[in-house]
């Protein structure tokens, strides 16, 4: 796996699901289970990750501690415990899951940034750093890069709100006309 940015995680996920289904005796390799579990977490598909965890045979879980470590990340995601998620991600992962776990770490930080942006008018820098799972200096820099403002005296960050693009609404008559044309096209 060359660079993390070059990996098609969605395609890899589909490929691994197919390999799991085709596995002899219905039991895949521990590496496949680890990658698939990590990919489900990357895609924020905690339900699929939970069902995958339940169908992994116990002997494979017990023989591969990395699987349990990946699942711990999933459990923290389920609880939305961001500081614990980041702590769980700070492991020395095997080469097969390292790019996925690195991408998961970045994805979690983007999600956290967007949550703070939507939920807070202002937030203390220390609280923001904990929520982002990074040191205060890095958290400040990440916020400033996003265009947030920092009050140095109160140490509060003010998120830059994302401007919502308004959708064009059609008058009811025009909307009905479009639907009528569409149905007429389908009938002919």
Image (cartoon, rainbow, N blue to C red):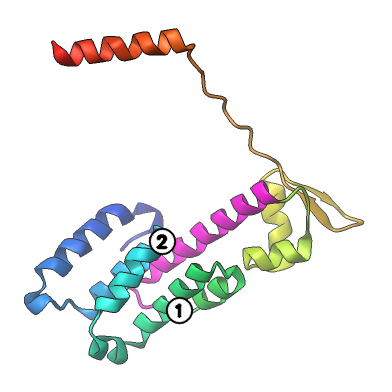
**Which label belongs to residue 92?**
none
Viewport quadrant of the N terminus? bottom left
- Residue 62 appears in which quarter of the rendering? bottom left
Judged from the image, the secondary structure of the residue bearing numbered disc 2 is helix
Nearer to the camera, 139 or 114: 114
How far, Cα to Cα, is label 1 from label 2? Answer: 14 Å
Judged from the image, the secondary structure of the residue bearing numbered disc 1 is helix
Q: Magenta stretch?
A: 92-119
Q: Position of residue 145 (x, y in %)?
A: 67, 48
Q: Position of residue 59 (x, y in %)?
A: 24, 91
Q: Residue furthest left?
A: 24
Residue 8 visible at all: no
Left or right position of 145 against 81: right
Left or right position of 56 against 168: left
- Residue 136 appears in which quarter of the rendering? bottom right
Residue drawn at point x = 34 percent, y = 68 percent: 49
Left or right position of 141 against 88: right
* Residue, disc 1: 72
Nearer to the camera, 34 or 3: 34
**Which label belongs to residue 42?**
2
Q: Residue furthest right?
A: 153
Query: Is 108 contained in the magenta span?
Result: yes
Query: Is 128 contained in the magenta span?
Result: no
Residue drawn at point x = 65 percent, y = 47 percent: 118
Viewport quadrant of the C terminus? top left
Residue drawn at point x = 46 percent, y = 12 percent: 172
Q: Position of residue 75 (x, y in %)?
A: 46, 75
């Amino acid at each position: 796996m060359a660079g993390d940015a070059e990996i098609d995680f969605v395609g890899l996920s589909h490929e691994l699901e197919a390999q799991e289904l085709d596995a002899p005796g219905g039991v895949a390799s521990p590496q496949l289970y680890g990658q698939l579990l990590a990919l489900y977490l990357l895609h924020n598909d905690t339900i699929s990750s939970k069902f995958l965890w339940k169908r992994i045979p116990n002997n494979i879980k017990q023989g591969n501690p990395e699987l349990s470590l990946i699942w711990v990340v999933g459990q923290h995601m389920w609880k939305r415990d961001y500081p614990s998620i980041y702590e769980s991600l700070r492991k020395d992962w095997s080469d097969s899951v390292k790019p996925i776990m690195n991408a998961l770490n970045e994805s979690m930080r983007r999600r956290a940034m967007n949550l703070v942006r939507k939920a807070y008018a202002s937030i203390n820098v220390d609280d923001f750093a904990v929520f982002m799972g990074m040191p205060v200096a890095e958290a400040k820099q990440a916020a400033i890069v996003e265009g947030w403002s920092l009050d140095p005296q109160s140490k509060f960050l003010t998120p830059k709100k994302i401007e919502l693009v308004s959708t064009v609404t059609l008058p009811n008559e025009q909307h009905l006309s479009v639907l009528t044309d569409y149905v007429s096209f389908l009938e002919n």
